[in-house]
Image (spheres, grey):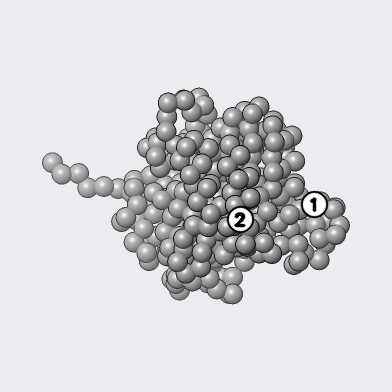
Amino acid sequence: MRAPTRPARRTAPACGIAIALLLTAPVAHAQPARSADRTGGSLVLVGGALKDDNTAVYGEIVKRAGGPAARIGVITAASVPESQDPDADDPDLCSNSACNGAYYAGLFEKHGAADAQWIPIDLDHIANADSDAVVAQVNSMTGFFFGGGDQYRYLTTLLHGDEHTDSKVLAAIRAKLTRGAVVSGSSAGAQIASGQDMVSGGESYEGLRDGSAPGYFDDPARLGHIPEGGFGFLRSGLVDTHTGAYGREGRALRLAADTGSARNAPPLQAKCPEPDLLQCPSEQSQATRRVLTRLHVFVSVRTQAVEN
């Protein structure tokens, strides 16, 4: 198959973040692996355009999933399903959920995982999100990777409609994260980790000019957001992806202002340009966020009043 391409403007993910000040963050060195007595797993969120030879990123995910014993579950429900891919029968040109799942599974094994498997959920197989057999597959994994595409497809395949409640598979992944697994994602797969007010689309110019609105819109320039958010793995902040490539800072600022995220978020947030990596211990561990990157990232800091 061909490597998954950079998403089109309509489907490329990004998010509003709580932000009061932008600054350049210094490069941080990788920390030691998580100690055995620390509770909770970790998040590894990638800005996008993840190349197949990026040993630093794939290696970090594999390390956190158990190194040579790592078993990675690959979720690619943000991709179109086979039924919507005109090249589905061509292994060199296909770009759909099943094809992309096999592609990433092969890459994780190439980068040292003992096993990597596609989790067979997409728009053609929504029922699998509540399949006991797929839950058992998830429970056999030590780490997970969410691929790119359109983050809204993750909402429609792994959550239950307007109730925004977990499917059995998502509940199992959430439980694995709590017990120490690593959950990772690139592009839309990073965006879906967000908590409330996840961006569903839009451009900076139109967003700054016209403001944001809740919902998912056909107009790719209209700044939209999902008030209930994504999967909420990172409830304390939202991650913006492809910032350097697409100039996403403007719409992030506008969404933060429109939704009050800057008032409600904790002091530190981050936005990752391609191909930067934001590593966040899970909410349970209460450890400090850090960035592993060869470039720079924009970090936003919310100023706080200090009483004397």
The mark nearer the N terminus, 1 or 2, is: 1
The residue singled out by tag 1 in the image is: 2
Image location (x, y in percent) of residue 271: 49, 49
Q: Residue at x 48, y 28 (%)?
A: 34
Q: Residue at x 76, y 66 (%)?
A: 83
Give the class, few, some or many, for how many residues have Cα within 10 Å of label 2's Cα (few <14, many ≥20).
some
Q: Residue at x 49, y 32 (%)?
A: 28
Q: Nearer the viewer, residue 202 or 88?
A: 88
Can residue 15 be seen in the rendering of this structure? no
C-alpha distance separating marks 1 and 2: 30 Å
Give the class, few, some or many, for how many residues have Cα within 10 Å of label 1's Cα (few <14, many ≥20).
few
The residue singled out by tag 2 in the image is: 131
Please state the total of marks drawn on the protein image: 2
Amino acid type of disc 1? Arg
Image location (x, y in percent) of residue 5: 72, 54
Image location (x, y in percent) of residue 136: 60, 45
Q: Check disc 1 and report its element: helix, strand or loop.
A: loop
269, above or below 55, in the image: below
Please identify the quarter of the rendering in which residue 295 is found: top right
Amino acid type of disc 2? Ser
Q: Check disc 2 and report its element: helix, strand or loop.
A: loop
Q: Work out which residue is located at the far front of the displayed protein and give it.
A: 132
Image location (x, y in percent) of residue 61: 60, 36
Can residue 155 be seen in the rendering of this structure? yes
Please identify the quarter of the rendering in which residue 257 is found: bottom left
40, above or below 262, in the image: above
Location of the C terminus (image quadrant): top left
Of tags 1 and 2, which is closer to the observer? 2
